[in-house]
Amino acid sequence: HESGIIGELPNGIPNNLMPFITQTAIGKRKALTVFGNDYPTPDGTCIRDYIHVVDLAEAHVVSMDRFFENKNKANLEFFNIGTGNGFSVLEVIKSFEKTSGVKLNYVIGNRRAGDIIQIWADTKYAEEELGWKAKRTLDEMTLSAWNWEKELAK
């Protein structure tokens, strides 16, 4: 959350990029491994659709309002929720370094078996049916995550 009061605290070693970044920056982890830099992407790293947790929560509220107001078209509806844009691992790292002012210790490692080169959500249906669109930027995401990690360390 933007306040830094709540955030992601995985058990053990994080499986998600953002908490691994923040835990590395705060000193809980020695280094972040970037799995491959030879993918056919602009900077060679995998691309994913990262969404701010508050945007995700707002999408849930809008979809539940739709349901409770009987505006849904079926008993069960599916919406792709994301930003609709992909960010590479190195773009996320650079955003974090910019917003936090912390130089991140990372190394380039081997590719992970089965990693998809690039994927992001097609949010058109959610935009049309829910009137919802993610608002927060990558910089806002990385800054919020860093504020949480710093607050947690107190």
Image: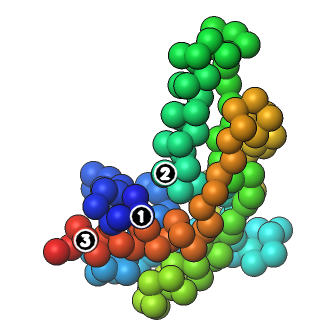
- Amino acid type of disc 3? Glu
SS state under label 1: loop
Q: Of marks 3 and 1, which one's residue comes earlier in the chain?
A: 1
Specify how the rendered protein is coloured: rainbow
Task: Work out which quarter of the rendered image holds the C terminus and state it.
Answer: bottom left
- Amino acid type of disc 2? Val
Residue 96 located left or right of residue 132: left
SS state under label 2: helix
Q: Of marks 3 and 2, which one's residue comes earlier in the chain?
A: 2
Closer to the camera in the image, 119 or 84 = 84
Residue drawn at x 54%, y 69% as measured from the top left: 140
Closer to the camera in the image, 44 or 132 = 132
Residue drawn at x 72%, y 60% as measured from the top left: 86
Around disc 2, counting alpha carbons within 10 Å, would you say few (fewer than 14), some (14 to 19), or many (20 or more)? some
SS state under label 3: helix
Residue 151 in picture, x, y percent from top left:
25, 71
| Residue picked out by circle 2 | 54
